[in-house]
Image (tube, rainbow, N blue to C red):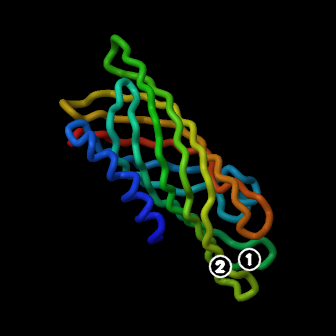
């Protein structure tokens, strides 16, 4: 957790160069488990709130974002409680397509780290805390709602391969989210 905070601070400091051009964003999404075994253990998915800070560099929007995901279920075979949680720390780039209408589609992608933890109530299984690399392409639409405020609806898919117990699993999956961006 401390490692995530230090990395976030190092990545946010250069955004100070664009102090007059900063915006913040908040979104609430629902992420579906992408890996079939994780779906069997943890069920369909869970809510994932996300916070970000970004800037514009020409037509490209750069965003540093983080969030929180946690999903509980029952271990296969033992039927004991287990929880998968992670904090993603991502740098994302978006390209909005300016249209004549007031709704603008966009495409983007992000890369970063997932600081994940698997907690088990079973004495037979150990808890795991590790880091995984992730990649997340995204599409969405933006609609200005007032001066300096934009509503956002997006669809993304997180690819984050990890080996919490020696077998490779995709910790990510499909996410639908609704959010708001506002200029500072």
Query: Residue 51 at x, y = what percent?
Result: 37, 52
Q: Secondary structure at mark 1?
A: loop
Residue 102 lies, in percent from the top left, at 31, 19
Q: Residues within 10 Å of mark 2 (few under 14, many from 20)?
A: some
Q: Quadrant of residue 179?
A: top left
Give me the residue at 50% from left, 61% from top.
87
Residue 146's place in the image compared with 119, above or below, is: above
- Quadrant of the rendering where the C terminus is positioned: top left
As measured in the structure, the alpha-carbon distance from the residue carrying label 2 to the one carrying label 1 is 16 Å
Residue farthest toward the top in the current orientation of the protein: 100
Q: Residue at x 32, y 45 (%)?
A: 15
- Residue lying furthest bottom: 123
* Sequence-earlier tag: 2 or 1: 1
Does 75 appear above or below 150?
A: below
Neighbor class of circle 1 (other Cα within 10 Å; few <14, some 14-19, many 20+) is few
For this view, does 176 lie left or right of residue 62? right
Judge from the rendering whether residue 184 lies leftward or rightward of residue 14; answer left or right: left
The residue beneath circle 1 is 79
Residue at 50 percent of width and 33 percent of height: 108
Residue 131 lies, in percent from the top left, at 60, 63
Judging depth in this view, the residue of 177 and 90 nearest the camera is: 90
Residue 24: horizontal and vertical position, in percent? 30, 45
Which residue is drawn at the image coordinates 71% and 67% (left, top)? 164
Q: Which residue is mark 2?
A: 127
Give the tally of numbered discs. 2
């Amino acid at each position: 957790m401390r490692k995530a905070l230090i990395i976030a601070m190092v990545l946010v400091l250069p955004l100070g160069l664009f102090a007059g051009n900063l915006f913040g964003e908040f979104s609430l999404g629902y992420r579906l488990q992408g890996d079939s075994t994780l779906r069997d253990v943890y069920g369909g998915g869970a809510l994932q709130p996300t916070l970000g800070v970004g800037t514009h560099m020409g037509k490209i929007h750069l965003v540093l974002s983080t969030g929180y995901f946690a999903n509980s279920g029952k271990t296969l075979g033992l039927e004991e409680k287990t929880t998968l949680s992670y904090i993603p720390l991502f740098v994302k780039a978006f390209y909005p397509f300016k249209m004549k209408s007031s709704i603008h589609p966009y495409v983007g992608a992000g890369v970063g780290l997932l600081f994940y933890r698997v907690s088990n109530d079973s004495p037979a299984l150990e808890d795991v805390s590790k880091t995984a690399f992730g990649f997340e392409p995204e599409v969405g639409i933006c609609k200005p709602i007032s001066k300096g405020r934009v509503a956002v609806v997006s669809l993304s898919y997180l690819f984050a391969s990890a080996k919490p117990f020696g077998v490779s699993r995709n910790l990510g999956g499909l996410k639908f989210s609704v959010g708001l961006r506002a200029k500072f």
